[in-house]
Amino acid sequence: MSNGNKSLNNFFKSNEFIGSFQSHKDIKNILNTNDCCFIGRSNVGKSSIINSITRKKNLAKTSKTPGRTQSINIFLINKKINLVDLPGYGYAKVSKVMRDNLAGLIQDYIEKQVKLIQAYVLIDARVGLKNSDIDMFDLLSESNRKFSIVFTKIDKCSKSYLEELENSMQSLMKSYNKHFNQFFFTSAKKFEGIIDIQKDIYALSKQ
Ligand SMILES: Nc1nc2c(ncn2[C@@H]2O[C@H](COP(=O)(O)OP(=O)(O)OP(=O)(O)O)[C@@H](O)[C@H]2O)c(=O)[nH]1
Ligand SMILES: [Mg+2]
């Protein structure tokens, strides 16, 4: 496990929970700092990665059970940039009404949040890509949002498997070259790859 970079850790240590929101109209005027958001299928590790980035165990609520985050949770870092924890998509076990509500909440946020400057789409490396992820790439590019892909839970995968995964994803990303930035390979559990995301967000905070 790496202890990371001291000055980056200090930057992210200054954080505060701003609130939990059920609709886009409640958040649009709440802060004038830019957002970066964490999107992905339910249980992929969105809330966990926020905790690893900020080095705070329970800043964002995590759970073994999919469907934990059911609202938009905003954390302000260093008074300069917001980390936005979104509900997961693609979870079959919630009611259709709830699923539609959450999908609408995510879509509204992506389409309408003017201050959203970067999205991180998380993909569980063991599970790989699903159709719902491709729908998300389409929504992001149609909304003219920049995004990067963050593979999570790499502590459960072999190096050769991860290389294959990257190769296959690289060809798909050619179709999104106007909006796609880069891949990150991470383990929130072992703090692998977290420093790279911290650096990326730190750079965003300067925009
Ligand atoms: N092995 C391993 N498990 C992880 C990692 N990151 C998250 N998990 C586990 O995955 C489960 C889901 O994590 P969450 O962070 O709650 O996932 P989420 O994407 O926020 O889920 P929803 O809010 O339900 O959409 C938890 O049991 C975490 O402990 C990781 O890097 N490695
Ligand atoms: Mg969550």
Image: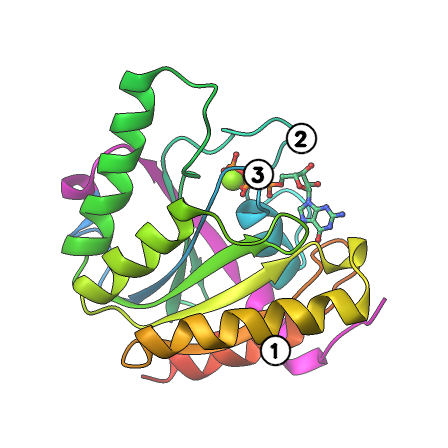
Residue drawn 55% across the image and 80% down it: 199
Inspect the image, locate mark 2, and give the three-letter code of the amino acid beneath it: Lys
Numbered label attached to residue 124: none
- Circle number at residue 196: 1
Q: Is residue 56 visible?
A: yes
For the residues labelled 1 and 3, say whether their Cβ atoms are less than 8 Å apart: no
Q: Residues within 10 Å of mark 3 (few under 14, many from 20)?
A: many
In the figure, is residue 46 to the left or right of 194?
Answer: left
- The secondary element bearing badge 1 is classed as helix
User: Residue 94 versus residue 108: which sits nearer the camera?
Assistant: 94
Instruction: Please report whichever mark, 2 or 1, sits nearer to the chain's N-terminal start.
Output: 2
Q: Residue at position x 32%, y 74% from top?
A: 175
Q: Is residue 31 above or below residue 86?
A: below
Q: Amino acid at mark 3?
A: Asn
Judging depth in this view, the residue of 187 and 17 nearest the camera is 187
- Residue 198 against residue 102 in the figure, above or below: below
Marks counted in the figure total 3
Specify which label sits upstream in the sequence, 1 or 3. Answer: 3
Q: Bounds of the magenta span?
A: 1-26
Identify the residue at horizontal 55%, vertical 43% (top origin). 60
Name the residue tied to disc 2.
Answer: 64
Q: CA distance from mark 2 to mark 3?
A: 7 Å
Write down the residue under mark 3. 43
Q: What kind of residue is marked 1? A: Asp
Query: From the Cβ of disc 2, is ligand 1 less than 8 Å away?
Result: yes
Secondary structure type for disc 2: loop
Image position of 73 (left or right of 28): right
Disc number lying in front (1 or 3)? 3
Task: Give the image location of residue 77, x and y in percent.
Answer: 46, 64
